[in-house]
Amino acid sequence: MKTANLKPTSPWTRTAAFAVATLMLALGSAGCSSECSDAFDCRNDNGQPPEGERWTCRDEKCETVPIDDGSQPGTDAGTDAGTDAGTDAGTDAGTDAGDPCVTATHDATLGTLQLQTGFQVGQSVALREDVLAVAASPGPTYTLYAVRGSGATAALYSLGIWPALQSEGTKLQDVVSEADRTGTARVFQSGYLVSDGKRLFTGYTTDAMQPTGSIAVHDLATPAASTHVSAPRNFSAAAITSDVSTALLVNGGGLGSTSGDLGVYALVTSAERFPTAKVASFPAEAGASGITAVAGNGIVVLGYATPPSYVNQAHAVAPAKVSEAISSGTPIALGTQPKFEAGSDFNGAAAFGDGVVLNRGGYDSNYNFISTDLSRYSLTIGISDVAIGDREPVLAYADQCTSVVLMAPLGPDLLVGLRDKNGRRLVRLQQAP
């Protein structure tokens, strides 16, 4: 989601909303003498700001300011488009007189984005402004779920059967625990939503003195069995399923009773009491969490960001290795696994059939992420390890007037949330026959 994480996932939104995904948290250690040296630190330690605001570092203290107050914007260090300010910068500017986005020609479905060879557009459905993230049930009939709202008021909703979605939807439960809703700490949504067919998962963090966080686990069949699991600084997530087990993979700083440094942790939902384990350790150069996604064939994509510029990195891991790490308790050394050569930074990811799609681009001098394209990479199990295919452009950005604000798999297809002067919408993308 990140889909980050594009979301996985995971994860997508702007600094004020998500957003992916984002996405969110970059897992650097908080200092003792000061809170921050720049907006990167505030984003990394505190996650997503409240709706309509962004982080800034003033006098070594993290503060939130209105998005349009003219000061330096915060940035999501190493992740998910879901929380990125830059992906929506052109859209917001489109309401200002004299901006080229006002007069630019917008396709009714894709806006100013350009569909590339090998892919086709399916249905398009209007998307509410308050939707932070979406997830679909397993097919062939897809129920769509959403996180709506932000901060302590965020809630899970069922939106109905795709593509006949309900504008209002049915509220399932509040995302944030009662203790955190009524407490004094501020709450920041992590920006991802995951479905494993039986449960929904979404995370949040707080600005308590020691970074804390939780994952809301909503049981679709037995809502009374829903719960929260401690997950300090959770960043992105994705579900893995097999004939014998299911688990949620969480990119963050610990999960349940399993604590540790940066890494990927598993919540085994097919076992009683949801045991946890550390699945992957990051290489020494990692400075922040990153994307998490699981392709349709079960291949797992895990990421992190490297300082000082916090460029995202991603590796592909065979499902058998993940299962072995969960059962043995011995984490995978992620740096030894096949690595994506993305050719640029990226700030979101999501499964797209037997592959993953990345939102590529880079940050400008004002920490806005300027997207260049959505590109897909096929993933296959090779003779000795996972094989990563060549880059296949899916959508190209002609400008920044239309933004991708979230991504989520819909069976073998991809849902992209778009925003521009014509509003927000969900668009289904498919691989051409």
Image (cartoon, rainbow, N blue to C red):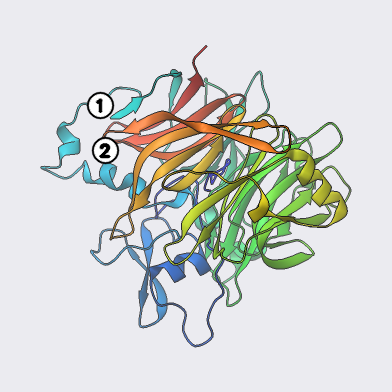
> Which mark, by number, is residue 146?
none
The one nearer the camera, 151 or 234, is 234
The part of the image, by quadrant, that contains residue 30 is: bottom right
The one nearer the camera, 81 or 390, is 390
Q: Residue furthest top?
A: 433
- Judge from the rendering whether residue 371 lies leftward or rightward of residue 204; answer left or right: left
Quadrant containing the N terminus in the rendered view: top right
List x then y, in percent, for residue 137: 66, 29
- Judge from the rendering whether residue 253 lies leftward or rightward of residue 45; answer left or right: right
Asked if the residue at tag 2 contacts the one at tag 1, i.e. Cβ–Cβ closer than 8 Å, the answer is yes
The local crowd at label 1, few if under 14, some if 14 to 19, many if 20 or more residues have their Cα within 10 Å, is some
Q: Residue at x 35, y 23 (%)?
A: 109
Mark 1 belongs to which amino acid? His
List x then y, in percent, for residue 90: 26, 44
> Which mark, by number, is residue 401?
2
Which secondary structure, mark 1?
Answer: loop
Q: Residue furthest left?
A: 98
Mark 2 belongs to which amino acid? Cys
Q: Residue at x 37, y 62 (%)?
A: 54
Position of 160 relative to 350 (above/below): above
Residue linked to disc 1: 106
The local crowd at label 2, few if under 14, some if 14 to 19, many if 20 or more residues have their Cα within 10 Å, is many
- Judge from the rendering whether residue 387 lies leftward or rightward of residue 66; answer left or right: right
The one nearer the camera, 78 or 404, is 78
The part of the image, by quadrant, that contains residue 42 is: bottom left
What is the spatial separation of the Cα atoms under label 1 and label 2, in whole angstroms?
9 Å
Residue 159, visible in the rendered structure: no
Position of 60 relative to 163 (above/below): below
Q: Earlier in the sequence, mark 1 or mark 2?
A: 1
List x then y, in percent, for residue 309: 42, 63
Position of 332 relative to 38 (above/below): above
